Amino acid sequence: MSSTTTTTQQSQGIFKSFLDTSARSDSVPVPRGPTTASLTFYAPPKDGASPFNYVEKAPEGEPQKNYEELPHEQNINDIRGRESQFELNTHAFAAIQNISSEEKDFNDDAHIKSVYYPEVEKLLLDHVPGANRILLFDHTIRRSDPNAHRAPVTRCHIDQTAKSAAQRVEYHLPDEAETLLKGRYRIINVWRPLNGPVVASPLAFAASSSVPDHAVVPVEHRYPHRTGETAGIKATEGQEWYYWSGMTNDERLFLQCFDSQGKGARVPHTAFADPRTQPEWPGRDSIEVRALVFG
């Protein structure tokens, strides 16, 4: 393998960071190993108000969001080659490899729901211990094209809080919610690239236990027809951030946003600009499917 090698000093010791020049058919190298990058963390509104953001365009006279953002240099370690060391009940994320799909284009929502959704449901039932029922409630396709409806999100966040997770059960399964909320329920995002290997805007995710509760701040998530709740993440000492270098189209990342039993709890995550990425390299396209997982 031909590679360009640099050395990165991190708090845990000296690790090698390199560009794998054999991994893409278009001759674009894939950044591998640990890196240090600027992540965007949450800072509270200056006026002391409760934080909010609008999912769609904000109403006239309202800001899109009212809280502040704080960049912070963060060490980010690569899980490539040690995927089996991480699991939902400990870290709140898990890496699954060698998964094929009949869905190829990801251009039609109806086709995604009829072809890709059943694959995701089976994947979760097969790989989430104890899971016995899945409800996939939405998906988002993100593209790096400046004209795309949704782009990679570059702020540290969690998609759901305890409050909004319970609201999701009540919203999607109102007739069964009272019973379901008494058992174990989780929200898990299934994330994958559409044009891997990923060489730009990779996804970073933090081990749940390394992010204290006081660093997780509920934020009103305002839709046109209802209000949910996400969480912003404050920068605190000791956070352990990871990414999965060069994710391919047959790899899946489970991101657990909430667990009613609190075992793996929740995983903060964000896209980030890897300093090794060059401007001419292809941007990342991806899809995340969000699931209520029972049992």
Image (spheres, grey):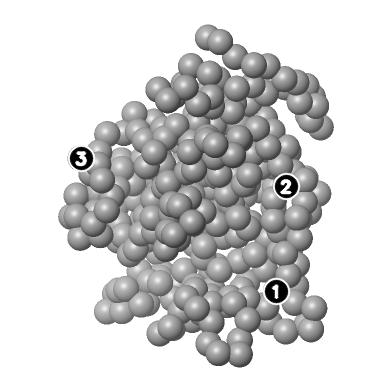
The residue that disc 2 covers is 38
Q: Quadrant of residue 112?
A: bottom left
Q: Quadrant of the C terminus?
A: bottom left
Residue type indicated by callout 3: Glu
* x and y, in percent, of residue 54 in the image: 53, 77
Estimate how packed mark 2 is, as few (under 14), some (14 to 19) or many (20 or more) residues with alpha carbons within 10 Å.
Answer: some
Q: Nearer the viewer, residue 147 or 161?
A: 147
The residue that disc 1 covers is 67
Q: Is residue 148 above or below residue 285?
A: below
Is tag 1's residue or tag 2's residue first in the polypeptide sequence? Answer: 2
Q: Is residue 87 left or right of residue 207?
A: left
Q: Residue at x 31, y 60 (%)?
A: 136
Q: Nearer the viewer, mark 2 or mark 3?
A: 2
Q: Residue at x 68, y 60 (%)?
A: 233
Estimate how packed mark 3 is, as few (under 14), some (14 to 19) or many (20 or more) residues with alpha carbons within 10 Å.
Answer: few
Q: Quadrant of residue 12?
A: top right
Estimate how packed mark 1 is, as few (under 14), some (14 to 19) or many (20 or more) residues with alpha carbons within 10 Å.
Answer: many
Q: Residue at x 71, y 42 (%)?
A: 37
Asked whether disc 1 touches disc 3, contact meaning CB atoms under 8 Å apart, the reply is: no
Query: Disc number at residue 260?
Result: none
Asked whether disc 1 touches disc 2, contact meaning CB atoms under 8 Å apart, the reply is: no
Query: Disc number at residue 102?
Result: 3
Asked whether disc 2 touches disc 3, contact meaning CB atoms under 8 Å apart, the reply is: no
What secondary structure is found at the residue carrying circle 1? loop
Residue type indicated by callout 2: Ser
